[in-house]
Amino acid sequence: MKVLVIGSGGREHAIVDTLAQNKTIEKMYAAPGNGGMREVAELVPVPADDVGVLLDFARRERIDLTFVGPEVPLSLGVVDVFRKAGLKIVGPTAGQARLESSKSFAKQFFRTHGIPTADFRECATASDAYRLLEDARFPVVLKADGLAAGKGVTIAATRDEARDAVKRVMEDKSLGEAGSKLLVEEFLDGEEASFHVFADGTDFQPMVVSQDHKRRFDGDAGPNTGGMGATSTNDILSPELRKRVIDTIIRPTLDGAKTFGGILYAGLMLTAAGPKIIEYNVRFGDPETQVILPRLKTDLLDILWDMAEHRLASRSLEWQDAPAAAVTLVVKEYPGKVPAGKRISGLADAKQVPGVRIYHAGTRFEDGHYYTNGGRVLNVTATGTTLSQALDRAYAAAAMIEFEGKDYRKDIGQKGLARWK
Ligand code: AMP
Ligand code: GLY
């Protein structure tokens, strides 16, 4: 069995590492992969969004199964192209990926299917948006329609802030085409949770719930990032709320998006009026994957194969009760422009901390050493019998790793710990 994983982040390292536990895989490839993934997969120097070259590679190497990590190749139709060529690939088609790649499509979809979400209006021009802001309630949420790598959302506390955001996105085109339409959305108050499911086109299986830490600095201050850390524990949602999410959000979505196959990740806001959907992603979250997969007891390749063969219903998934936590080590300038090529030390010692796994993100391996190669550098993940133990382990390992400009949030999991008090 030969497997190809497309992508290069901490998410993809966690996927490759989990797949590697299956001994029927003779060869695993990662395109383009990162420094850490080379320990378990052969790196293929093809960018994740170069669909044509990926197809040539998969044909030439006779890849048995391909799994796609990031959203961009999905929205470019990598699944459509591979399937047309008769290759097995797990993920949604480009049409289905619009649930993530167009926020306006997603919001219309929620409305059509009666899925609880924030009220919204769509604006095609800046003057429409300015007019709408005249009698909006604040804070208000402004969202660029297209994919903007986490930079498309502004939560404006005042009318002036909101007007600035409209000018930036619609008049100055700071996000390019992604900002050609703008959604003006009701602000939802509550705790956020990431709800992932495996879907095979007919049936689905939920995963354990997780929480991201999107803001750059402690206390949820500073700009939004790709994610600065995550936790996964069984108590994020009560069994009743979990059922409510499945019945009011997940099932109506999959009934509406007929034949959706792949990973569906619902970004939820747990409001006083019940769980509401903020947005869908059509792929695994990063860094959520780094805390979900260490808790999965069922073989991941078996699940992916079932998804490809549309027989997920026959499998029951097993998860560890043990909580997991991940701390993302970044270069201090992140999410701004970061320098690359700083030598990383301490990885071997950090890996020895019980329960710890290290998933690389922006790293490169050269002449026997790892170097930084991006803003998010490493994810230090740990499991433990309690969340507090998982966090202590992750932070102990994080402290052993060094590179110039290393920075990380010191408050990952604090909301989760507060639930125990
Ligand atoms: P997104 O890029 O859609 O994931 O949004 C980024 C973040 O903005 C979310 O994780 C939330 O923290 C916040 N956000 C988005 N929409 C809303 C909303 N309607 N109310 C409150 N916060 C929101
Ligand atoms: N952790 C947020 C995301 O993957 O979109």
Image (tube, rainbow, N blue to C red):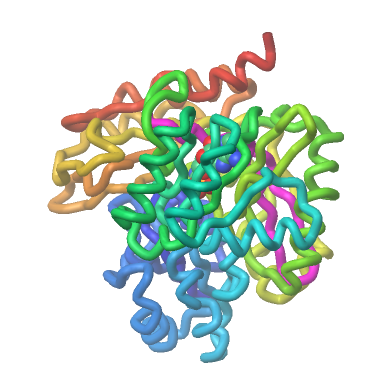
Chief SS of the magenta region: strand
Instruction: Spot the residue most to the top.
Output: 421
The mark tally for this picture is 0
What residue do we see at 46% from left, 50% from top? 11
Instruction: Point out residue 275 in the picture as x, y percentages from the top left corner.
Output: 75, 38
Front residue of this view, candidates 329 and 168? 168
What residue do we see at 45% from left, 74% from top? 76
Left or right position of 298 against 7? right
Above or below, 3 against 155 in this view is below
Instruction: Point out residue 349 in the picture as x, y percentages from the top left corner.
Output: 32, 29
Above or below, 288 against 108 in this view is above
Left or right position of 298 against 330? right
Residue 176: within the magenta? no
Left or right position of 260 against 170? right
Above or below, 395 against 167 in this view is above
Instruction: Point out residue 385 in the picture as x, y percentages from the top left corner.
Output: 63, 23
Residue 209: within the magenta? yes
Task: Tell me which corner region of the image, top left, top right, bottom left or bottom right, holds residue 263.
Answer: bottom right
Instruction: Spot the residue most to the bottom.
Output: 85
Q: What stretch is highlighted in magenta?
A: 193-216
Front residue of this view, candidates 190 and 317? 190
What residue do we see at 77% from left, 62% from top? 112
Instruction: Point out residue 48 in the picture as x, y percentages from the top left corner.
Output: 37, 68
Quarter of the image where the C terminus is located: top right
Front residue of this view, candidates 20 and 379? 379
Left or right position of 291 against 215? right
Q: Is residue 89 visible?
A: yes
Q: Is residue 229 visible?
A: no
What residue do we see at 57% from left, 67% from top? 98
